[in-house]
Amino acid sequence: MKVEWAFFSKRRNVTLEEWIREYKLNDIQDINQTMERIGLQPPSSKDIQSVLNEIKKADSKTASAKRRAAPKKAATPKPKAAPPKRSAATKTSTRAKRKTTKK
């Protein structure tokens, strides 16, 4: 018995776009085959195609933005100073710090 995509997406709180990106699918045939293998009834081909178009547009925008961005210099982290060592005389035991409630 196949599960409808609408039920699956609501139950798993996942969108078609997120699901396609996670499985790294590129075309309608791959999506339909993967859904058949999992036991899902795929949404309409129009819905799948519109989501694929949105993904391609978003990927092209991020790729062009990466090309335009100038490389930034990595900031060198400052080394942290080591905490001062405590001598045996200044150390207090945990028992000395605790306040007991026993009478």
Image (cartoon, rainbow, N blue to C red):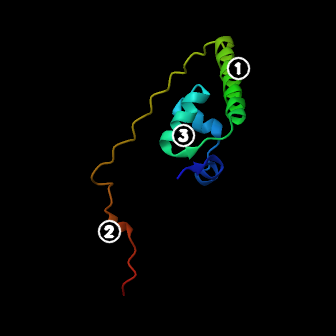
Q: Residue at 58% x, 25% y: name it.
A: 26
Read off the residue under disc 2: 95
**Could you give the CA–CA distance between mark 3 and mark 1, rounded to whole angstroms?**
28 Å
Find numbered disc 2 in the image and state the secondary structure of the residue it sits on.
helix
x and y percentages locating residue 96 in the rendered image: 34, 68
Closer to the chain start, of discs 1 and 2, is 1
Residue in the foreground of this view, choosing between 47 and 69: 47
Return the residue nearer the eye: 57 or 44: 44
Residue 61, disc? 1
Instruction: Please tell me how crowded label 3 is: few (under 14), some (14-19), or many (20+) other residues with Cα within 10 Å.
Output: some
* Residue situated furthest left in the rendering: 88
Q: Residue at x 33, y 48 (%)?
A: 86
Name the mark on residue 35.
3
Mark 1, secondary structure of its residue? helix
Residue 95 falls left or right of residue 17: left
Closer to the chain start, of discs 2 and 3, is 3
Q: Residue at x 38, y 67 (%)?
A: 97
